Amino acid sequence: MIRGLYTSATGMIAAQTQSEVIGDNVVNIKTAGFKEQLASNISFPSKQIYRIGGDSTSVALGGMGTGLGVDQVTRSNVQGSLDVTDAKTDLALKTLGYFVVQTPDGDRYTRNGHFQLDSEGMLRTAEGYTVQGEEGSIGPLSSDFRVSAEGVIFDQGQEVNRLRIAEIPEDALQREGQSLYNATQGVQASVGAQVQQGAIERSNVDLSGQLVNMMSVMKAYEANQKVIQTQDELLGKAVNEVGKIY
């Protein structure tokens, strides 16, 4: 019975973790370039249950589950729809890969292409990090710069830089904040990356799907909660009533 409490508790913890992932998806539904997070469960090893007879013989009754947990949280790489803004500083990736930005902690990676020019003409993120090109930080630029589909940057008729687009293995991405990622292993330059200037990639979060998932998670949480309440009542009876001498 005690084991049953632990099994149900693991189910509640897994449901809580899933609800946090869903909530994070919903909060970032309007964050440019945000990728929907997916939480997958894993079952703990089941245990074989036996019935011991009076003659010490055992009869297998079957397996008993020992609970589950969240195995990993991954990201959906489905391309988000593009919003055309016509702003020259807005850039959208139409292929896999990440823009490279320079932070105080080193290179970080993002698909949020909502950039801006600072007073010195440097291309920066909304947080103030400089966007990186193959020749270093991009800028200074005039307000009339152009970015080709291949990521080549032209300003006043001259090629001045080329966007650094990095390809990173899914399991090497470590999220930092809303739309920044760190890489836990080496990254490679993207081959054949396509960029659209004057557009932003929207989040690929499906709101209706998230609401359906939340309802399923809530039902699983409530079911495990009721199981724990029932087992707690049975334990109370076992302790207070079974074997009571009248």
Image: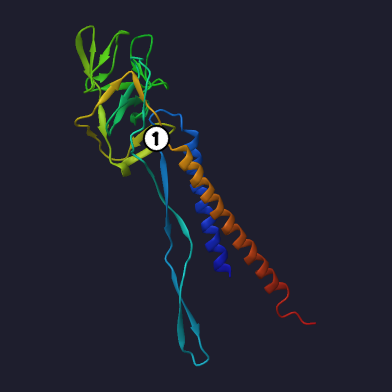
Question: Within 10 angstroms of label 1, few (less than 14), some, or many (20 or more) residues?
Answer: many
Q: Position of residue 158 (x, y in %)?
A: 19, 9
Residue under numbered circle 1: 204
Which residue extends farthest bottom? 55
Q: Residue furthest right?
A: 246
Horizontal and vertical percent position of residue 71: 41, 53
173 to 10, vertically: above or below:
above
Q: Nearer the viewer, residue 86 or 192?
A: 86
Compared to residue 226, the image places residue 170 above or below, namely above
Look at the image and tell me in which quarter the C terminus lies: bottom right
Quadrant in which the N terminus appears: bottom right
Name the residue rendered at 51%, 88% in the picture: 53
Location of residue 78 in the rendering, given as x and y in whole percent from the top left corner: 34, 38
Judge from the rendering whether residue 159 lies leftward or rightward of residue 231; answer left or right.
Answer: left
Q: Residue at x 62, y 60 (%)?
A: 226
Decide which of 194, 70 is in the foreground and name it.
194
Identify which residue is drawn at 28% across, 11% down.
145
22 with respect to 99 (left or right): right
- In the picture, measured across the screen, residue 69 lies left or right of residue 92, that is right
Q: Secondary structure at mark 1?
A: loop
User: Residue 143: which quarter of the image?
Assistant: top left
Give, as a three-letter code, the residue at label 1.
Answer: Asn
Residue 155's place in the image compared with 56, above or below, is above
Image coords of residue 82 (percent x, y): 35, 26
Quick check: 158 left or right of 28?
Answer: left
Badge count:
1
Quadrant in which residue 244 is drawn: bottom right
Coloration mode? rainbow
Identified at 50% across, 45% down, the residue is 212
